[in-house]
Image (cartoon, grey):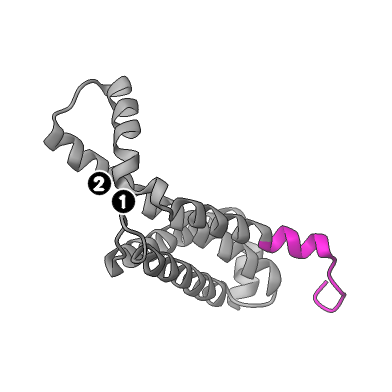
Amino acid sequence: MWNRRRSLNFWLSAWLPVGIGILAILVESTEWLGSDNTSDPLQWLYESLFGHVSAAQWKVIHLVIRKSGHFIGYGLIGVAWLRAWWMSLPRSQFALDAFLALVGTALVASADEWHQTSLPNRTGSPWDVLLDCCGALVLQLVVYLFMRVFKPKRLMHADGY
């Protein structure tokens, strides 16, 4: 498989999830989805499910929801990058694929935060980039542990033991 020419379908299968993840970030990184515009709809949904909260409580809950979104969203993008590198470099070690995935995630997160500094109702923060990379790293570790349990042959071959 490594020496054969790969089809367009293979490359789309490998890299389209990364592209979709980046597109989702582009959509979410707009003025319309800033915290000032998401607070009311999210508060309505939260209170519909869990009951009324004070303004002070909502401020904390909204922050937790938004930061959890960073962690989970970029965690999923990190896994998409990991999968793409895993497919594209079938003889590489898992650690290399994970490193490349983390670099890709960090680049997207950095570009996103930089872009947000140009929007009137958004801010860019290096702390968000760190949170995004932590999400990617944690989900990559989950994938690694899953692979150790359910696909040890591929992982052991790739890691060289």
Per the image, the residue denoted by label 2 is 63
Q: Secondary structure at mark 1?
A: helix
Per the image, the residue denoted by label 1 is 67
Amino acid on which disc 1 is placed: Lys
Observer able to see residue 143:
no
- Residue 18 bears which disc, if any? none
Q: Quadrant of the N terminus?
A: bottom right
Q: Quadrant of the C terminus?
A: bottom right
- Spot occupied by residue 4 in the image (x, y as percentages of width and height): 87, 75
Q: Quadrant of residue 22?
A: bottom right
Residue at the far front in the pictured view: 120
Identify which residue is drawn at 69% across, 62% down.
14
Q: Is residue 100 left or right of residue 141?
A: right
Question: Camera-side residue: 148 or 121?
Answer: 121
Identify which residue is drawn at 27% across, 66% down.
127
Badge 2 crowding class, 10 Å Cα cut-off, few under 14, some 14 to 19, many 20 or more, is: few
Amino acid on which disc 2 is placed: Leu
Q: Are marks 1 and 2 in contact (CB under 8 Å)?
A: yes
**The residue stretch that appears in magenta:** 1-15
